[in-house]
Image (spheres, helix red, strand yellow):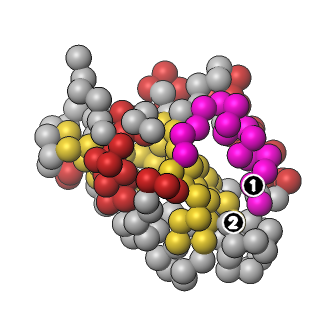
Amino acid sequence: MKEKIEQKAALAALNHFFRNEIEPVGLDQVYSLDANVFERWVRQSSLKKVQKKKLARILKPLLDASAIEGVVFRGATLVEDGSRVDMAILAIPEAFTPKLRDTDIFIIYADSDGDGNGDGGDNGDDDNQQDTCQYHRCFCANPSNCGCVTATQFNKDCPDDECSSDKDCGGSDGGSDGGIREVLGAF
């Protein structure tokens, strides 16, 4: 039986994972997601209508199965420019990873600065921005559970890859997600 991860430890692991994208968030900024909460979050988000439709199409297998689990970071501060965003971070159940390009987690950025343009606050034209991109980064739920996580990101350019296998992260090369699904389930 796996030991349940405490929320403070889970948040520390997530803050470390996103260290180059956002300033550390506090527990008061983290909200748990299920399918109903996620759909409501998307409806109320600042994402443009066309982006909401694309997102629904991409995540259709998860939405149809009510297989949404994850968290929202509300009012996270972007490292690159200090603007504020809301981020939904979804754990992709292993049964669905082949349908979503072998993704472990799916990350959605939405504007939270009040200008309503869905760009994370830079007031730029995001119509030319790709909808999704994918990157690989080490994730460690704890020092004995590290893996190379595949993240698909929506509505924001991706950072560079950090790893190509679990060995790059100090783990064995067994296809581990580093415990990210358990971490997201801690909230």
Give the mark nearest the N terminus, 1 or 2: 1
Considering every residue shown, the one lying at the far front of the view is 28
Distance between the Cα atoms at labels 1 and 2? Answer: 8 Å
In magenta segment, residue 176: no
User: In the displayed structure, would residue 113 be above or below residue 36?
Assistant: below
Q: Amino acid at mark 2?
A: Asp
Q: Position of residue 170 (x, y in %)?
A: 14, 49
Is 45 in front, or is 51? 45
Q: Residue at x 78, y 74 (%)?
A: 115
In magenta segment, residue 44: yes
Q: Are there few (<14), some (14-19), or many (20+) residues within 10 Å of tag 1?
A: some
Instruction: Evaluate if marks 1 and 2 touch, with contact meaning CB atoms under 8 Å apart.
Output: yes
Instruction: Report the number of numbered marks.
Output: 2
Is 154 in front, or is 21? 21
Q: Position of residue 175 (x, y in %)?
A: 28, 34
Say left or right for 27 vs 114. Answer: left
| Visible residue check, residue 150 | yes
Q: Residue at x 77, y 60 (%)?
A: 46
Q: Quadrant of residue 126?
A: bottom right
Considering every residue shown, the one lying at the far right of the view is 49
Classified by dominant secondary structure, the portion drawn in magenta counts as: helix
Q: Which residue is mark 2?
A: 111
Q: Which residue is mark 1?
A: 45
Q: Residue at x 46, y 68 (%)?
A: 22
Q: Which residues are magenta?
A: 31-46
Q: Secondary structure at mark 1?
A: loop
Quarter of the image with the C terminus in it: top left
Q: Secondary structure at mark 2?
A: strand
Say left or right for 95 vs 14. Answer: right
Q: Residue at x 78, y 51 (%)?
A: 44
Q: Amino acid at mark 1?
A: Ser
